[in-house]
Image (cartoon, rainbow, N blue to C red):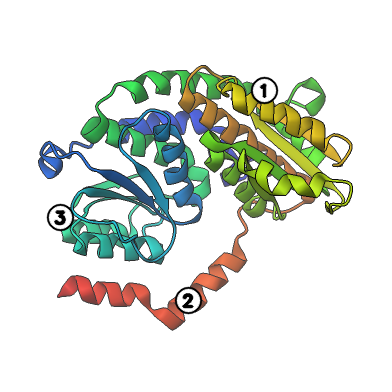
């Protein structure tokens, strides 16, 4: 039986990382940058494209001396100027919020780079004379995460970072994802160690609450949004240690927790001691207060493998949950209706084309 397109693309994530890295490494923008180093990098986009910027930020923040930010919305932040690199992510190339920030940031003097499978973003980059990274089309954005993330990081490594770190960590990441694939494949039942299927069964009919920690905040957010889009279920994400300064109060005897919570703790051998202790305390405090308590550990020795492996397990769990619920993970009809109404009322892309023609 043929696999659902989103399921197939997600399952083959290791291949996506290879393909994306090859695209990014081949993008020589040395004439555009001419030795320039940004004072900050802003990743911008929405939904399944924006998460690429969030994950890239998670990876960079641990070692890169250039400040990184993720912006979701129509307008660039006030600090955008000629010393900032704005990395615009829109898989379709037609996301109006991303296009808005791309155009406005360019007008503010920022260096702009676009990544899409085509669309108006490719046209805009051509008109503005800025680099555009083109990836293969045909997927829904969230199912193209591997190729988008690796092409983004490879481009930055080639043209800005020049650290060698991404090349080293990419090899570890691909190996980890290939190994995980064999254990998470549809043919492997939960009782034989398919962690993604185990999670799906434990989450079915429950409210997923996903706990990450500060260095993988975007991974927890990815889990939440994949449960939203693929599984069509409401979900919550929380970040430690911040959750220990507010949310934890609801665990008290006089607190209120909704019934039927499936708490998911995202763990890693790369956790610093403070986070390790906080995660262990969180697990103890939640014990007996939630319907299911699930710990998911990352794989691999590198920061990128940690991020990619946790994302992969979450993506596959959300797809198996969709299967259990009998829903099509590719059905985003309400988003399409919303976009159609926005387009009819705002006509943003028509206005942008008029600006480009001047």
- What residue would you read off at disc 2? 342
Q: Residue 316, how many percent across, how many down? A: 64, 37
| Numbered circle sitting on residue 124 | none
**Image quadrant in which the C terminus is located:** bottom left
Q: Residue 284, how many percent across, how many down? A: 80, 30
- CB contact under 8 Å: marks 2 and 1: no
Q: CA distance from mark 3 to mark 1?
A: 45 Å
Judge depth for marks 2 and 1 and give the one in front. 2
Q: Is residue 341 above or below residue 230?
A: below
Name which of mark 2 and mark 1 comes first in the sequence: 1
Near mark 3 (Cα within 10 A), the count class, few <14, some 14-19 or many ≥20, is: few
Of helix, strand and loop, which one carries label 1? Answer: helix
Name which residue lies at 41% across and 34% down: 61
- What residue would you read off at disc 1? 183
Q: CA distance from mark 2 to mark 3?
A: 29 Å
Asked if residue 198 can be seen in this view, the reply is no
- CB contact under 8 Å: marks 2 and 3: no
Name which residue lies at 22% across and 60% down: 106
Name which residue lies at 62% across and 54% down: 229
- What residue would you read off at disc 3? 129
């Amino acid at each position: 039986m043929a696999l659902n397109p989103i399921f197939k693309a997600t399952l083959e994530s290791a291949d996506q990382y290879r393909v994306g890295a090859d695209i990014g490494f081949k993008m020589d923008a040395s004439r555009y940058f001419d030795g320039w180093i940004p004072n900050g990098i802003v990743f911008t986009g929405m939904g399944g494209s924006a998460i690429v910027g969030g994950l890239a930020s998670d990876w960079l923040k641990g070692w890169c001396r250039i400040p990184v930010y993720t912006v979701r919305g129509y307008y660039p932040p006030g600090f955008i100027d000629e010393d900032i690199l704005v990395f615009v992510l829109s898989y379709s190339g037609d996301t109006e919020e991303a296009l808005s920030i791309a155009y406005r940031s360019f007008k503010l003097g920022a260096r702009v780079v676009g990544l899409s499978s085509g669309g108006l973003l490719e046209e805009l980059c051509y008109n503005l004379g800025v680099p555009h990274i083109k990836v293969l089309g045909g997927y829904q954005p969230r199912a193209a995460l591997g190729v988008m993330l690796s092409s983004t990081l490879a481009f930055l490594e080639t043209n800005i970072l020049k650290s060698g770190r991404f090349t080293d960590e990419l090899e570890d990441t691909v190996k980890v994802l290939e190994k995980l694939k064999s254990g998470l494949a549809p043919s492997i039942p939960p009782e034989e160690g398919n962690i993604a299927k185990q999670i799906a069964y434990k989450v079915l009919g429950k409210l997923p609450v996903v706990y990450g920690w500060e260095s993988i905040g975007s991974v927890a957010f990815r889990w939440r949004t994949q449960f939203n889009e693929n599984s069509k279920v409401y979900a919550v994400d929380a970040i430690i240690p911040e959750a220990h300064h507010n949310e934890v109060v609801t665990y008290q005897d006089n607190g209120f927790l909704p019934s039927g919570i499936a708490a998911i703790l995202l763990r890693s051998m790369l956790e610093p001691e403070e986070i390790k202790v906080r995660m262990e305390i969180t697990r103890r405090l939640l014990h007996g207060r939630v319907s299911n308590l699930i710990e998911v550990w990352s794989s691999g020795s590198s920061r990128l493998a940690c991020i990619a492996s946790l994302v992969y397990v979450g993506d596959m769990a959300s797809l198996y949950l969709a299967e259990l619920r009998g829903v099509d993970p590719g059905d985003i009809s309400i988003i399409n209706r919303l976009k159609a109404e926005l387009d009819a009322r705002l006509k943003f892309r028509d206005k942008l084309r008029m600006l480009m023609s001047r």
